[in-house]
Image (tube, helix red, strand yellow):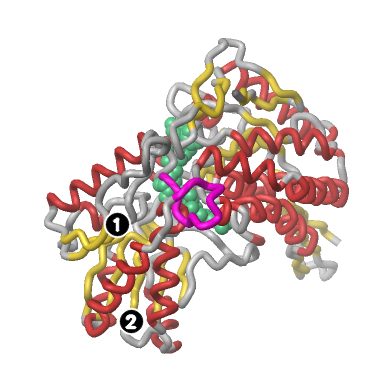
Amino acid sequence: MKTFKHFINGDFVSSSSGRQFENRCPVDGSLIGMVHEAGQAEVDAAVQAARAALDGPWGQMTQAQRIELLNKVADRINERFEEFLEAECRDTGKPRSLASHIDIPRGAANFKAFSETLANHPTESFKLDTPDGAGALNYGVRKPKGVIAVISPWNLPLLLMTWKVGPALACGNTVVVKPSEETPATTTLLGEVMQECGVPAGVYNVVHGFGPDSAGEFLTSHQEIDAITFTGETRTGEIIMQAAAVGLRDISMECGGKNPGIVFADCDMDKAIEGTMRSVFANCGQVCLGTERVYVERPIFDEFVKRLAETAAGLKLGRPEDPDANFGPLVSLEHRDKVLSYYRLAVEEGARVVLGGGVPDMGAELNEGAWIEPTIWTGLSDDARVVNEEIFGPCCHIRPFDREEEVIELANSTDYGLACAIWTENSARAVRVAEQMETGLVWVNSWFLRDLRTAFGGAKQSGIGREGGVHSLEFYTELKNVCIKL
Ligand code: NAD
Ligand code: 6OD
């Protein structure tokens, strides 16, 4: 059985309180190990270590030296690929085929991409005319923001944590990470990689625990934290924003979604089915960008519903290591209870269950796991809770529409604004509709196609701020203007 300790000031340490909690595998409910729960003492130690590294070795390094170390970290993750893959799949239950293409390679790439962006991004400069004719020169300098708290979720644990840690460190900050209590493994393993690569002690720290009255709250309310970057539920984001308001600390919020998919009759049906399969069911529906509302133009509605249901019925549920499996369990029994409550609610709200709607019989060994059926509904009204609340499971509601303006209004009629997928072969329509979507991200004839140089983030209640490319530099640095009178 494994033990997950905190990683503070370059060492793995236990909780002084002795408090630990269980980490269970959602595939079969087996115990993976025990996780140390940080109290105020561990959080204080981690923040102090991060501050000392910022003022000491890390702060004194040149940008080129820091980038060289971060490239080493990326390479080392790739060398230890199998261990990261194993750890991620055990914590989440996701298929190895998925994690080996997305989670782990992206976990490594996040260290290289932002180092490259930083190295190649100029700062601004303006020459100012002055009455004496001599002028003045203004130029911008980027300074690290300081000690950054990184609060990450469980759905893509390594990818979403390094998506923040990569740019934060590239910009010269130090970090204290609180991974989700559900998925402590890869964040802990990254501590070993930091040690091996010679990243100075205190640059990367990890504290384990929960949110309220635990590591999450202690960290986000800590006054020595200079900025907080958070990915998770909108409700949690609101609580963290209140903590950040004390001391006026900066925040980046990547929160929930209730993302629409819009399928026009002029789409390439094969592409639309393949893309919607991924956007609804990938990672067992636990992707913030995932589609939970599908709007299909009436002439192709019946065919689309039939084909999506037939294809989804062919999803192969199985253990992560099963090479044929492309559908794993939900992350935990607790999360399954939440998703199942929506499966019941859909029926109460009058849905026609086209596919699924329950718990599959996986056989004796796996029935203790958090397995759930891929599910498709039609027939709900636009004000149904199932159509408006984020479920974060492998399910969608499909509704017909008749006019472009109608579907734009339907798609936008939500408090969220993260992502949208549009399926059409008419490029003028694609551009027109994309422009009117009240979301931070729009994909046309694709989904979750990522270019790390682009802005990533949500509108409305899906988030505040943008990360990715130069936008991450904006958040992770303080831009200082120097004005020299000539
Ligand atoms: P969550 O909000 O429950 O937890 C996220 C993190 O916040 C965890 O580490 C948790 O321990 C911590 N936390 C909880 N309460 C806290 C508190 N009071 N103070 C400090 N920390 C606290 O989210 P989750 O269930 O882990 O993840 C799923 C959610 O994340 C979904 O809503 C999904 O849409 C969203 N998400 C958004 C994005 C995005 O990029 N916009 C990406 C992935 C997931
Ligand atoms: O690809 C990314 O950079 C990213 N932040 C993905 C988020 C996925 C949400 O579940």
> Ligand 2 near label 2 (Cβ, under 8 Å)?
no
Part of the protein shown in magenta: 318-329
Observer-nearest of 118 and 298:
298
Ligand 1 position by quadrant: top left
Task: Name the element at disc 2.
Answer: loop
Report the residue at 26% width, 62% height from top.
397
Label 2 crowd (10 A; few <14 / some 14-19 / many >=20): many
Provide the residue designation for mark 1.
375
**266 sits to left or right of 3:** left
Cα gap from disc 1 to disc 2, whole angstroms: 22 Å
State which quarter of the image contains the N terminus.
Answer: top right
Where does the image place residue 182, in percent across and percent down from the top left? 49, 34
Residue kind at label 2, given as amino acid type: Phe
Mark 1 CB within 8 Å of ligand 1: no
Asked if the stretch drawn in magenta spans residue 322, the answer is yes
Percent x, y of residue 311: 37, 68
1 or 2: mark nearer the eye: 1
